[in-house]
Each structure stands twice: as C-alpha cells, then as structure tokens.
Amino acid sequence: MSYIPGQPVTAVVQQIEIQKLRDGVNLILGFSIGGGIDQDSSQNPFSEDKSDKGIYVTRVSKGSPAEVAGLRMGDKIMQVNGWDMTMVTHDQARKRLTKKNEDVVRLLVTRKSLEEAVRQSTMQH
Amino acid sequence: MDTESIQSGYSHHSNRSRGSNKQSERSSRDRHKSHSRDSSSRSDKNVTISASSAQLQQDQSSAPTDAQDDNWGETTTAVTGTSDHSLSQEDLAGFGKETETPAEKLNCIRFLPLVLTLFLGLLVLVTPLAFLVLPQLVWPERLQACGTACEGLFLSLAFKLLILLLAGWALFVRPARASLPRIAVFRALLGLLTLLLLLSYWLFFGVRILDSQDENYQGIVQFAVSLVDALLFIHYLAVVLLEIRHLRPCFSLCVVRSTDGETHHYNLGLLSIQRAALVILEHYYKDFTIHNPALLTAAKSRAAKHLAGLKVYNVDGAGSEAATAQSRAKIAAAARHRDTSHNELYYEEAEHERRVRKRRARLVVAVEEAFTHVRRLQEEEKKKQPGDEMDPREAAQAIFPSMAQALQKYLRTIRQQHCHSMDSIQAHLAFCITNNMTPKAFLESYLVAGPTLQYGRECLQARQWTLVSEASVTSPLRHGTEFQLKSSDFSLVVTSKAIPHLKLSEEFVHPKSHKFVLQLQSETSV
C-alpha cells in the first residue's frame, strides 16, 4: 500500500455497503477512523508504510452496521460514495462519512489479506 | 614471651621512622633506599613473627597431647589465636600513643633549605653590585666616565634587582609546609643553575675584567645588567617549574583509608610522588572524617571469632606443607560451618541504630530547651538593668549542666566521647551563643563526624607519616602508581589513574533551525 508520489495507486479493494443506523437524531455507522494528511502518520499502528496518510479504521463497535457489513479494524478506506479518501484531512473524511442526507455509504476498503488472497488465487492458475 | 618480641619489633620500627625523618635531605640516596626498605621489610617480618608464634603455640599445645596422654587435661594450654592477637594489638595501640611526642621538636634540619635559599639570595644581591663597585675601587683613575647611558643602566639595574629580590622573596622565602623524605628535585636543580650562572659570571669577570683591568665602564655596567636579566629569566623558569606546571590536572588519585574504607578522589597534575603525597595529606585533614578506632572493635571481634572457631590439630606428625594444608582445611571447614554471625550482626546493628536515634532525640530536645533560657541583652535593656548580665562564657557555663548528661550519653553511644572534652564543649557553646546560632547549629559538630582538623589536640592524629612506595619517591606520578601513607593507627592507600585524553568536537546549531510541528493523532467515531 505504499505509493510513489505522482504515480497512480493500485490496490485490491472490497466494496462495503453500510446502512446507517438512526440513533435519535444522529446517524451512526459504528466505527472510528484515524489518519489524514494533517495527522502524524508515524503513529498509525495499522499502516505498513508509516508515511501513508490515508484514512484507517481504528475501531469497529460490536454489532454495529459496520461490523455487519464486513468492515474490519485496520482497513484503509480508499473511497466513500465515490469521493477519494487517500488525500484528505481528518475533518474532511469525517464530514464525508457523516452526511445527514445519506442513508447508505458505499466504501471501498483495502486490506493486506485481500492482496494476499488475490495473489494466492493467481498463483494457483 | 612472644608478645614481648612483637613489642620490641614495633618499637624498633617506630624509632627507625623517626630517625629517618631527622636525617638531612641531602643524604645519599642509597642510605635512604636501604632505610625505607629496611623499615618496610621489618614490618613484614613482624607480621610473620606473630603468625609463626601463633603456629608455634598450636604446635606446642599439640605436642604435649601426644607425649603425655594420661594427664593431658592439665598440661594442654588453651591458648587460642584471639588472646594472642588482641594482646598484641592493644600493645600496638599503646605504642602508637607513645611515639606521638606532645611537644614539637624544633628540628634544625627543617631550616636547612631556608638557610641555603637565603645564602643564594645574598649572593645574587651582592654579585652585580660587586661587579659595579670593584672597578671603581681597584682602578678608579683609568675608568672612562660614562654619561647618561650609564645612568640609565644604573636605574634599570636597581629596579631589576629590586624586582628580583621581591619575586625571590615571594617564591622562595616561605615557611616550609612539610619535610619531605627526599630533596625536591626542581628546587635543587634551580639552585644549582643559579650557582652555575653566578660562578660563570664571576669567572668571566675575574678573567676578562679584573685581570686585564678593562677601562670601558659602560661595558662593565652592561655586563652586570645582563647578569640580572639572566637571573630574572631563571626566576621565570622557577615560577613555571615549581608553581605552574602541576596546576593542570592529569591524574585522578583515589585515596582509601585502610581501616574503615573511607574514599576520596583528587585531581592532581604532574607531580613527583612525594609532592603528591603532600597534597593528599593536606586534603586528608580537610576531607576525611576523624578516624575513630572505637567503631572498628565490632568487626575485629567478629574476625577473631572466625579464627578461634576452628583449630586444626596435626595428628600424623608435622610436615613441610603442614601450614598450607592447615589453612586450607580451615577455610574449607569454615565454608561448610553454618554460623549465625550474620544474624547477630543484623540485629545488633538495628538495635544500635534505634538506640542512637533515641539518644539523639533526647539530646536535641535538651539542647533546644537549654537555648531558650539564654537571651541576648538589647542595648536599651543594658542601661536599665545592670544586674544579671553575663558574658558568653558564664552564660555557657550556666546552661551547660542541663544538657550535659544528654550530650555525654549520646557521645558515648556513638563512641566519640574521647574527641570532645568538657572545656571544648563549653567553649563551643559560648562561641555559638556569641554568634547567635541556633541549637541545631550548635549540635551539628556533635551529630556529624567532622574532618580531622576540626577537633582539638586531644584527638589529632600524629603528624608523623611514612611514605611507602615501590617506585622512587622523586619519580613522577604515572598511570597505575600505587603508594601508601602510613600513620600510627591506619594507612592511606593511594592509586593513581591518568585522566583520559578528551576529544571535543563541535557541532554548529543555527539559531533559526529550531522548528516544530504539532503531532496530532485524533480518532473520530462516525
């Protein structure tokens, strides 16, 4: 998941569709994010490359819509509803995920196990 | 009988050390070497004598058991190692006190270097003046009169001579700090150099000027001025060699007291061993706490108990390796024997600690109470009540009895009662009252063991020290030099280590290079 500036990033992603849960007046998804281009990326425990300033899932609440949809801790969010999340600030990421007029968020997430699975399947051929 | 032989050996040793100090510094090296070696070997011999006497005793006690089995109970002498050792140590302590002569003998040899220095100074003063005056006396009519140049030279000569005399007085005419065992090499060298210079100048003067009766007076005056210049440069050399060279620290010396292990470290420069010993002794009186032999009795009794615990009897007859076999057997048996002396030590120390703290608390309270009774009389009150005034000594005597007992008990518990006499305590009390000190300040000198110089004559150690060294004492200090300074009760063991060569490199930090960023790691739940 390391990238070279100026070059396109390729990653194996999985689409996860989460239905927002209505809790009173708030719409919650049930996970926490960390990271962003304005944050200190060296403290990120989930990233392989410590200069990766992407948005990572740091916590998934049990029984939440995110867990039900298949989101796991340590996933890197690449897109939210078509919006790019690889070069955003932390606050921008939060805003994209918590839009009040959206009931569903479609995330493209990537994780290391996905890459490995793809590699395994290509090796088998 | 054996103890008497030990006594005679030690007294002989102490007499020897006194005698060697009286000898002149300029005595031959060989004699000094043989003396120091003799005294050190004598002390070694003393150790072996007492050990062999203990062995002899054991053999004697074992022999009758073999010979007369029927009445062995009556003839076996139960002389153990303890009584022998403790008796000889007591005797040694007594002898130590005897060699401390109360009156300082005025040693004529101490003033020999001063006399020589003064003689040399006189010579230095007289020689240029003689060079100036002699031509005037011997052949005055043939001398060329010289004008202003000569007068200038006269002035400069006078001032230079004055400066030289003042500088020489400042550097050389000082009371000697100590009498060292051997001559101070640099001083002797400088004295010799000065003498050589003066002799050569006199030679030149005698041959070139007196014999030929030179008429050029200005030349003669310049000759005299050049002598004074040369002497000033020798004085500069003296300052550099004697005072400045050893200022930069090169060695770190570790000084350990042999009886209780108190350690201090000093940084010294390039010095000879005897001068380094002198510096260390000066620091000793200031830094080391007073040596208290009473505190060491517990350790000695424990050691004696270890020795006495096991006795080895040689049943099969004496052999040549009997001594080593016996000692090895003793050590092996001692290692196996499970004794409880560590237990006793622990509880004894805890008990002693508790006792000391209790006495100390009582003492502090008594002193504080005593001090409340004394108040300084103000100026106005002095005029109003001329009745009950007391000077500090009387005030001290008045309040002393209330704290005397507590102080005595405390001093006895920490075993320092021999260092402080009643007079000294009262004098100290008067001193504290005069200077408006608090009770805590008064007690400080009794609660904490201070350096040796603080105590009065009754506790002062002998100023007779013996320098024991393998290398010659005028050789310079090196890395790994070891020597000992022996006093009557204890010795200071000194080891020297060279201060490592330090490599300092620089790193330039631009003042504007200090920049910071905020490190945020926030986690938001969505």
Image (cartoon, coloured by chain):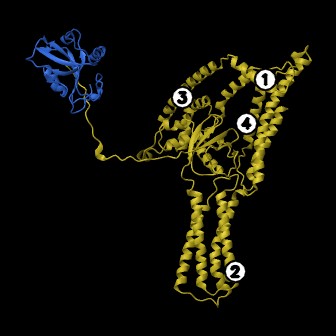
Kindly identify the amino acid type of the residue bearing the numbered disc 4: Ala
- Asked whether B430 or B134 is in front, the reply is B134
Q: Element type at marker 2? A: helix
* Mark 3 residue crowding within 10 angstroms, few (<14) / some (14–19) / many (20+): many
Q: In the displayed image of the protein, which residue is found farthest to the front?
A: A125
Residue B473 is labelled as none
Q: CA distance from mark 3 to mark 1?
A: 48 Å
**Which of disc 1 and disc 2 is earlier in sequence?**
2
Q: Report which colour depicts chain B.
A: yellow
* Mark 1 residue crowding within 10 angstroms, few (<14) / some (14–19) / many (20+): some
Q: Position of residue B160 (x, y in %)?
A: 55, 72
Residue B360 is labelled as 3
- Asked whether B246 or B106 is in front, the reply is B246
Q: CA distance from mark 1 to mark 4?
A: 30 Å
Q: Chain of mark 2?
A: B
**Which of disc 4 and disc 3 is earlier in sequence?**
4
**Which of disc 4 and disc 2 is earlier in sequence?**
4
Give the residue at mark 1: B326
Q: On the rendered image, what quadrant is the C terminus of chain B found in?
A: top left
Q: Element type at marker 1? A: helix
Task: Verify CB contact (< 8 Å) between mark 2 and mark 1.
Answer: no
Mark 3 and mark 4 on one chain:
yes
Give the residue at mark 2: B207
Nearer the observer: mark 2 or 4; the answer is 2
Nearer the observer: mark 1 or 4; the answer is 1
Q: Which chain is blue?
A: A
